[in-house]
Image (cartoon, rainbow, N blue to C red):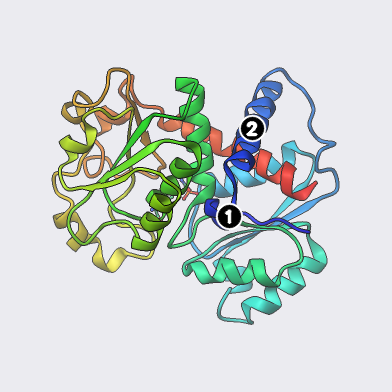
């Protein structure tokens, strides 16, 4: 039976811990110069992108190379997903060539459809609804820095978007308490919040960034307008005015709190440049850990 990574809600806490442990192991060994090219020797990953990317594209491609496999980049102009042929046919055809598919898409249903029709594992490299690979790299980062996850509080300052949704899944599975400060109308998806609370997780929706930051171990943010929201970016800029991680907000959080951002960042909007470069910031460790966490996912799903 093939296994997909479409949503972290489909993965148990044990499975997520398996990824984190393997990621930490692969990272340690990479630093020590251990050759991992036997792990996915001869395997190919198709990387389908409907949207731009720096981290996802480069970390998946580099990850495949380090594991001895190969990755093929299929950009919006290559296969014209959703325009040239059906998603079903793309999934079936790709499965005849490659050993895994990573897809970054607009509608979440597209990645679900790829997973339904592909006979090889499908990995969600971001959809409008979710970004599970980001949350895995983030949990690895928090675990490395704090040596634990359970019992910590993550405060998300900003839009209840794809990144926030996957963090809610990850926090629920790994025992972190999640809270978000957002303006009215920009809350996370109700069904995702309800799912987390059903798992016994704590999810709080607040309005005041300072209230969310108080007692938090992690301050997290993301752009106010996501890819595909260019037409409402100006409206969101107004709505989110004041929802900025700056030095003042960091001082409200617990001593030693981590400042996190999935990147790309819009400095001066959701985070100040100074906060992103402060000693609390781990934003570039997060970016690096995308590589290690995804290598663990690839090793587990494709080998
Ligand atoms: N954080 C993240 O997914 O970055 P990219 O959009 O550059 O892949
Ligand atoms: N929420 C952002 C995340 C980018 C990695 C977006 O979807 O554009």
Place of residue 198 in the rendered image (x, y in percent of width and height, measured from the top left)? 42, 53
Mark 2 Cα-neighbour bin, 10 Å: few <14, some 14–19, many ≥20: many
Secondary structure of residue under mark 2: helix
Say what secondary structure mark 1 lies in.
Answer: helix
Q: Quadrant of the N terminus?
A: bottom right
Image-quadrant location for residue 219: top left
- Do the numbered discs 1 and 2 sit on residues whose CB atoms are within 8 Å? no
Residue 111 % position (x, y): 57, 66
The residue wearing badge 1 is 10
Q: Relative to 108, is 132 above or below?
A: above
In this rendering, position of residue 251 left or right of residue 77: left
**Mark 1 vs 2, N-terminal side:** 1
What is the spatial separation of the Cα atoms under label 1 and label 2, in whole angstroms? 19 Å
At x 52%, y 71%, the residue is 109
**Given this view, does label 1 or label 2 mark the residue nearer the observer?**
1
Please tell me in which quadrant of the rendered image residue 188 appears: bottom left
Residue at left 49%, top 67%?
108
Residue located at (21% from left, 62% from top): 185
Q: Is residue 42 visible?
A: yes
Q: Left or right of 242: which side holds 297?
A: right
Identify which residue, 173 or 164, lies in the foreground: 173
What's the residue at 77%, 23% (across, down)?
34
Query: Residue 95: x and y, percent?
Result: 77, 66
User: Is 83 placed left or right of 262 in the picture?
Assistant: right
Point out residue 254 in the picture as x, y percentages from the top left corner: 27, 22
Q: Specify whether residue 285 is in view.
A: no
Q: Does ligand 1 reach within 8 Å of label 2's beta carbon? A: no
Q: Could you say which quadrant of the image residue 181 lies in? A: top left
9 vs 44, nearest the viewer: 9
Q: Which residue is denoted by mark 2 in the rendering?
A: 23
């Amino acid at each position: 039976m093939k296994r997909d990574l479409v949503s972290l809600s489909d993965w148990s806490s044990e499975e997520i811990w398996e990824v984190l442990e393997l990621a930490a192991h692969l990272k340690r060994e990479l630093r020590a110069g251990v050759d991992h090219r036997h792990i996915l020797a001869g395997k190919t990953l198709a990387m389908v992108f409907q949207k731009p990317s720096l981290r996802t594209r480069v970390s998946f491609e580099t990850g495949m190379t380090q594991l001895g496999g190969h990755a093929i980049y299929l950009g919006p102009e290559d296969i014209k997903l959703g325009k040239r042929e059906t998603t079903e046919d793309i999934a079936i055809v790709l499965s005849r060539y490659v050993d895994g598919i990573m897809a970054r898409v607009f509608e979440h249903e597209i990645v679900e459809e790829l997973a339904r029709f592909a006979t090889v594992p499908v990995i969600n490299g971001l959809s409008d609804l979710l970004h599970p690979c980001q949350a895995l790299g983030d949990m690895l980062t928090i675990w490395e820095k704090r040596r634990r996850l359970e019992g910590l509080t993550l405060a998300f300052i900003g839009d209840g978007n794809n990144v926030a949704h996957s963090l809610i899944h990850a926090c629920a599975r790994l025992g972190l308490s999640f809270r978000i400060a957002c303006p009215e109308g920009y809350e996370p998806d109700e069904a995702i919040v309800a799912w987390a609370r059903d798992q016994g997780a704590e999810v709080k929706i607040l309005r005041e960034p300072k209230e969310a930051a108080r007692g938090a171990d992690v301050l997290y943010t993301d752009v106010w307008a996501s890819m595909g929201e260019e037409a409402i970016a100006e409206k969101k800029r107004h709505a989110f005015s004041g929802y900025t991680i700056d030095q003042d907000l960091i001082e409200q959080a617990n001593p030693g709190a981590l400042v996190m951002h999935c990147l790309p960042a819009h400095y001066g909007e959701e985070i100040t440049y100074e906060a992103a470069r402060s000693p609390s910031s781990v934003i570039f460790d997060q970016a690096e850990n995308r590589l290690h966490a995804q290598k663990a996912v690839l090793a587990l799903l494709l080998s």
